Image: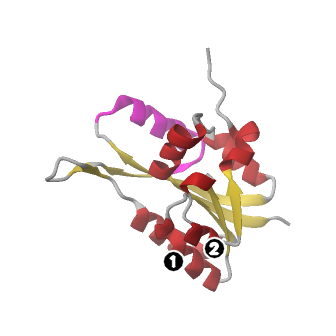
Amino acid sequence: MKRRAGIFIDGANFYFIQKDILHTRIDLVKLVNYFRIEFDIYNTFFYLAYREGDEKQENFIKLLAFSGITVIKKPIKQLKDGSYKGDLDVDITIDALLTKDNYHTAVLCTGDGDFERLAWTLRHFGKEVICLSAREATAVELVNACDRYIDLKDLLPLVRLEERE
């Protein structure tokens, strides 16, 4: 019998890894199916800060939802200095901890070092923690806190999004 996994995707971190490091897009359904080889997937959560009224993002959200991926979204807020903020780190942490009894392994799709404490806490509860990211965008503290690290570059042949013509 396969172990159960929960997949937690930091949408902003994942987007910038694809754009700035991999220079290609990842097919999230293929990514989930990659983990299905080893695990029964309890759920896949995708955390997204979005711009209200952005039709492209709304279509992306629908695509994820119809693919069986749970989308947790929060509108982007403009700060007084003119910058934008749409942080979902706390949401990811709370969901990973609240659902910990539903999986044996947590797959954290982020390189953000802020998740170091979450990884240590999940391991304290007996969970295996896998970090999935790109080496150039991953905090060494997070890698150290996890049981395993998988570099997205190594998975590209299996999970690259095939562009339609």
Residue at mark 2? 144
Quadrant that contains the C terminus: top right
Q: For this view, does 159 lie left or right of residue 66?
A: right
Q: Which residues are magenta?
A: 53-70
In the rendered image, the vertical position of residue 140 relative to residue 41, given as above or below: below
Residue 100 lies in the magenta-colored region: no
Vertical position of residue 59 compared to residue 108: above or below: above
Q: Identify the residue at horizontal 16%, vertical 52% (top origin).
A: 81
Q: Secondary structure at mark 1?
A: helix
Return the mark for residue 134: none
Answer few, some or many: residues within 10 Å of disc 1's Cα (few below 14, many 20 plus, some between 14 and 19).
Answer: some
- How far across and how far down the image is residue 152, in percent? 67, 49
Residue at the image point whose x is 41% and y is 30% from the top: 56
The dot on residue 117 is 1
x, y percent for residue 97:
52, 75
Query: What residue type is disc 2 on?
Result: Asn
Residue furthest right as drawn: 1
